[in-house]
Amino acid sequence: MDMLADLLDGVRARGALFNQTSMKPPWSLRFELGVQLTLAAMLSGQAWVISDQPVALGTGEIAIIKGPYTIADDPGTPPQYLVKSDDYCITESNVEACRFPEGPALLLSGAYQGPISERLLDALPPVTVVRAPNPLLDLVTAEMALARQGQRVVLDRMLDLLLVSSLRAWFDEHDAPAWYRTADPIVSDALRLMHEDPAHPWTVVSLAVKIGTSRAALARRFTAAVGEPPMAYLTSWRIALAADLLRDTDSTVAAIARKVGYGNAFALSAAFKRLRGMTPSEVRSMTVRNG
């Protein structure tokens, strides 16, 4: 099973926000776009991405960033502008369009509007930097220099391609989630079965029988590879799926419960409360308020 494809299922750019800014030192931008995921790349020059802690970003490197962040020429440079989704910058004294002097630093950023799968966000650190060159950056900058019919759709798909290729490169070279890096065929088969049919009433025994191994071998090898027992992983996977459905659909809690493998809304609520500290109804209410 292609676990990365499964993780990215449903993640699509729609009206992606792209911005290209040229700056000279000292410079610092605070991005508060109200989005969950942003890609930022230095087309020229060096920078620091500051989220929970500063992370260096070199020319041609791509950062995948969760939530608000600051990007600057130096971690000690205080933010000069607050960038919001209307492509305006807010200074301390007034609101004005972003106008930066020409300089050696050229920043490209693309933001995902709308919700992002919780399963993807959970798999990423606050800032993920991909050091390998990505030829798609040249295509994005070339497209942004044009004014053609269909450009919004083209840029949306380019952002998706940047995200997928960047994640694949990072997972291949760094400490990817255990479910992605496992080479154990028994563990891979168990993961595939749970991901393909999370609503099935799986047990360690039924998984082992389906795979053709013993219950003890499956439990031992799965826990060693993934870091938790099969049923604990399945519960987390079901709750993550339920969280996405609560946010992205109007289905009732009972319908979502059946879709992810719980017999009724009460059973889902109990599991959800145990893992997330709140009920599905509370999660949905928060989603509606944050709109």
Image: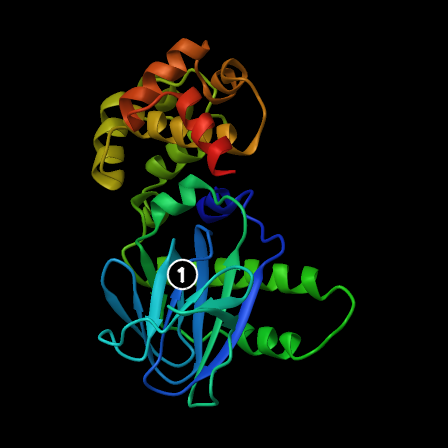
Q: Which amino acid lies under the numbered mark 1 shown in the image of this protein? A: Ile
Determine the residue positioned at 24% across, 67% down: 54
Residue 173, percent from left and from top: 32, 63
Left or right: residue 109 versus residue 29 is right
Residue with the mark numbered 1: 64
Within 10 Å of disc 1 (Cα), the crowding (few <14, some 14-19, many 20+) is many
How is colour applied across the structure in the image?
rainbow
Where is residue 252, by image quadrant?
Answer: top right
Q: Quadrant of residue 172?
A: bottom left
In front: 42, or 136? 42
Q: Residue 144, position in %: x, y?
A: 63, 75
Q: Residue at x 56, y 42 (%)?
A: 10
- What's the residue at 40%, 69% (across, down)? 93
Drawn side of residue 156 relative to residue 61, left or right? right
Query: The residue tagged with tag 1: helix, strand or loop?
Result: strand
- Identity of the residue furthest to the front in this view: 93
On screen, residue 110 versus residue 234, left or right, reads right
Residue 27 position (above or below residue 211): below
Res 19 seen here: yes
Q: Position of residue 87 (x, y in %)?
A: 54, 66
Up/down of 181 relative to 16, above or below: above
- Where residue 260 sits in the image (x, y, percent)? 47, 22
State the count of labels. Answer: 1
Residue positioned 53% across, 70% down in the render: 19
Residue 196 seen by the camera: no
Residue 228 found in image quarter: top left
Taking the view exactly as shown, the residue that stands out farthest to the right is 149
Q: Nearer the viewer, residue 104 or 165?
A: 104
